[in-house]
């Protein structure tokens, strides 16, 4: 599959320098750690163990790459899965009770100052690549890539999904729901 090869082997660009070039099209994207950047433990050791800087593969199937990748995932303007995972890994937690009483407590968000700090970290430490695909092919390509490359921060469809990440995400959901106080 040419799209799969071009996505992972193509030229990645700094996450902080792509705002003007992300297409308003459907597709799949890959996010990796810039050479020399690190993640907090135990995630850095787990990434090294996998022998890859690839940390996430995502799809823009219901929203375009412009809205999903740039808006939700890298700029924290929405409820992106990646931004929630990377924020949790970096040690950020949502405001206590911020989703209490709401039906969708999995869509926690970080406080505004934390979102700014997370986006700054993303811009300095991550690089991205994407490939445009017909909307009907996006999901199949994303799942195949996740299963083959087991990116560190993908939980769904990942045969090597990290229980450490699942626990952090559950902690964030409990804090946002007002069920558990954040650790000091």
Image (cartoon, rainbow, N blue to C red):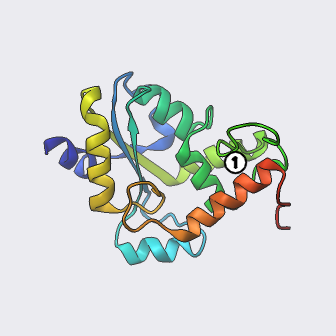
Q: Is residue 146 left or right of residue 156?
A: left
User: Which percent across, then down, holds residue 161?
Assistant: 45, 65
Task: Pick whichever, 102 or 72, lies toward us.
Answer: 102
Using a 10 Å C-alpha cutoff, classify the residue at mark 1 as few (fewer than 14 neighbours), some (14 to 19) or many (20 or more). Answer: some
Q: Is residue 54 left or right of residue 115?
A: left
- Please name the residue shown 70% across and 44% down the image: 105
For the residue labelled by badge 1, is the local secondary structure a helix, a strand or a loop? helix
Farthest residue to the left: give it.
Answer: 1
- Please name the residue shown 42% across and 62% down the image: 35
Instruction: State whether residue 76 is above or below residue 175.
Output: above
- Please name the residue shown 39% across and 21% down the image: 24
Quarter of the image where one finds residue 52? bottom left
Instruction: State whether residue 135 is above or below residue 128.
Output: above
User: Which percent across, then down, holds residue 179?
Assistant: 82, 56
Task: Pick whichever, 130 or 126, lies toward us.
Answer: 130
**In which quadrant will I find the C terminus?**
bottom right
Task: Pick whichever, 66 or 167, lies toward us.
Answer: 167
Quarter of the image where one finds residue 129? top left
Instruction: State whether residue 155 is above or below residue 58.
Output: below
On the question of residue 92 being in view, the answer is: no
- Please name the residue shown 47% across and 37% down the image: 17
Number of numbered discs present? 1
Instruction: State whether residue 47 is above or below residue 156.
Output: below
Quarter of the image where one finds residue 47? bottom left
**In which quadrant will I find the N terminus?**
top left
On the question of residue 167 being in view, the answer is: yes
User: Which percent across, then down, holds residue 58?
Assistant: 40, 44
Q: Is residue 42 left or right of residue 100?
A: left
User: Which percent across, then down, holds residue 40?
Assistant: 60, 69
Which residue was labeled with disc 1?
A: 117
């Amino acid at each position: 599959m040419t799209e799969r090869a071009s996505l992972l082997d193509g030229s990645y660009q700094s996450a902080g320098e792509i705002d003007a070039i992300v297409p308003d099209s459907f597709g799949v994207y890959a996010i990796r750690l810039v050479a020399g950047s690190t993640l907090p433990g135990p995630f850095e050791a787990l990434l090294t163990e996998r022998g890859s800087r690839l940390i996430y593969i995502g799809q823009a199937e219901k929203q375009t790459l412009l809205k999903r990748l740039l808006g939700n995932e890298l700029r924290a303007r929405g409820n992106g899965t990646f931004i929630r995972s990377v924020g949790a890994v970096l040690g950020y937690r949502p405001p206590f009770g911020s989703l209490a009483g709401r039906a969708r407590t999995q869509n926690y968000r970080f406080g505004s100052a934390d979102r700014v700090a997370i986006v700054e970290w993303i811009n300095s430490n991550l690089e991205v690549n994407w490939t445009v695909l017909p909307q009907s092919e996006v999901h199949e390509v994303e799942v195949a890539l996740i299963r083959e490359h087991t990116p560190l921060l993908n939980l769904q469809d990942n045969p090597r999904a990290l229980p450490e990440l699942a626990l952090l995400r559950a902690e964030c959901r409990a804090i946002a729901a007002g069920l558990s106080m954040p650790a000091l």
